[in-house]
Image (spheres, helix red, strand yellow):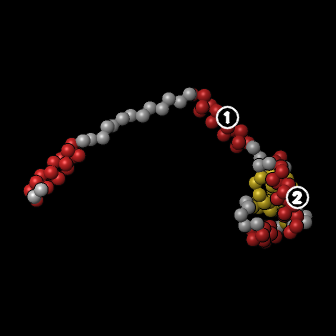
Amino acid sequence: MNTLQAFIFTAGAVVCCWSLSAQEGVVRVQQDPKIDQLLSLYNKVNSQKGYYQIQVGFGSYERAMELKSQVETDFPSWYSKIEFQEPTYRVRLGKFPDKLEAERRFLEVREKYPNAMLLDPENASR
């Protein structure tokens, strides 16, 4: 095969490939309307669900900031926050969805913070 034949063959192959086009299509998803109702109900229930938390201590704002800093050092991967409940600031740790997990973590925390208290979801939200 000489150069001219190779060029013509290559050009023909390119033209053939170029002339082929991908098919276009439309995808339609039919979803049962009850799925949206279930998702709405699921989100509503989960937004009202409380978590178990561990209260590590309380006091003035400065004391709470010091304690929160110390807690974040001791338990860096856990959620922690300061909440104001008149007349003091409270330092809380964790967001545990079930009681068993909360009690296990509570035992860990009590080793470093003996005055810590385990709060159930009703008390944790107050």
Identity of the amino acid at label 2? Met
Q: Nearer the viewer, residue 86 or 8?
A: 8
Up-down: is 44 above or below 117?
Answer: above
User: How many angstroms separate mark 2 from mark 1 (CA)?
Assistant: 33 Å
The 10 Å Cα crowd at callout 2, few under 14, some 14 to 19, many 20 or more, is some
Q: On the image, numbered disc 2 is attached to which residue?
A: 117
Tell me the quadrant of the picture where the N terminus can be found.
bottom left
State the image coordinates of residue 79 (x, y, percent, origin top left): 73, 60
Q: Earlier in the sequence, mark 2 or mark 1?
A: 1
State the image coordinates of residue 21 (x, y, percent, origin top left): 27, 41
Please tell me the numbered disc located at residue 41. 1
Please tell me the numbered disc located at residue 66. none
In which image quadrant can residue 62 be found? bottom right
State the image coordinates of residue 113 (x, y, percent, origin top left): 87, 67
The 10 Å Cα crowd at callout 1, few under 14, some 14 to 19, many 20 or more, is few
Identity of the amino acid at label 1? Leu
